[in-house]
Amino acid sequence: MGTRAPGRLQSRRPRVEVVVLPSAEDIAREAAGRIERRVRTNPEITLGLATGSTPEPLYEELGRRHRENGLSFAQARAFLLDEYVGLDPEHPEAYRNVILKEFVSLVDIPPSAVRSLDGNAPDLPGECVQFEKDIRAAGGVDVQILGIGSDGHIAFNEPTSALTSRTRVEVLAPQTREDNARFFSSLDEVPIHALTQGLGTIMEADEILLIATGSQKAAAVARFVEGPITAMCP
Ligand code: F6R
């Protein structure tokens, strides 16, 4: 939201628009329409991609618009929000694999244009620093897609994360591991650590589309829309 200033990484006063729609499909169409307008205006767009269940209908809708309306991501690039630490890179729940399956395979963005965080890097803090550099070198993220955790987390910035935080290693909250256990064969299989873009990193995106669906997200949404801005509800 808002016009890009020269140097879109500079901080601006954010303008927040809350759109309430009856179904996940309506939300997917609304979000896809906003992304489509940006892509058609700027085919070299830089997207920020979230994983999880919430954006799946959006990615399917973008895939449909690619197939049926010629919406092209061939010149786009993308940055992922986060990645588990220590998960086998071939694991279907590694976030790079999730995005390849749920978005990249549906459109024409080259997989090489999608920068994910390497949760098996020998130097994890170094990987986070390099990731930040790569976002800057790309000129920043134009449109960041976000979900929200039932505990209010954004990416894997769990409650108490600093609002100015940067990409780093984060310990997952017990609630988040329980929520995500549905993607694994057991809770024990859910990694304890993740790499995540920081809140400060995410807030530098030119536009953020945060999507929340389902009654299990109602409390978190109420806290972030109506409550004070605090590190307990990033
Ligand atoms: C995923 C991510 C997380 C999810 C959140 C909601 O990349 O950053 O913050 O957006 O955990 O997950 P779902 O959509 O599965 O409810």
Image (cartoon, rainbow, N blue to C red):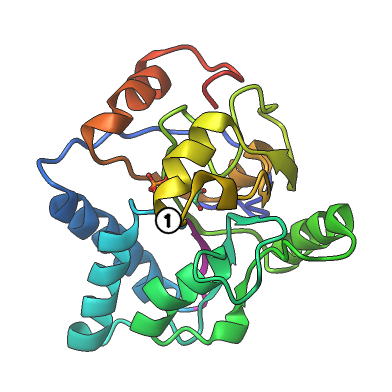
Q: Is residue 63 magenta?
A: no
**Where residue 151 sits: x, y (%)?**
46, 27
Q: Is residue 118 visible?
A: yes
Horizontal side of 220 relative to 85 (left or right) equals left
Horizontal side of 87 relative to 168 (left or right) equals left
Circle 1 is placed at which residue position? 183
In terms of depth relative to the viewer, which is nearer, 65 or 38? 65
In terms of depth relative to the viewer, which is nearer, 90 or 70? 90
Which quarter of the picture shows residue 120? Answer: bottom right
**Residue at image location 68% in from the left, 54% down from the top:** 7
Query: Is residue 3 positioned above or below 22 on the image?
Result: below
Which quarter of the picture shows residue 130? Answer: bottom right
Horizontal side of 219 relative to 10 (left or right) equals left
Q: Which residues are magenta?
A: 44-50
Query: Which amino acid type corresponds to the residue marked 1 in the rendered image?
Result: Phe
**Where residue 139 sits: x, y (%)?**
67, 64
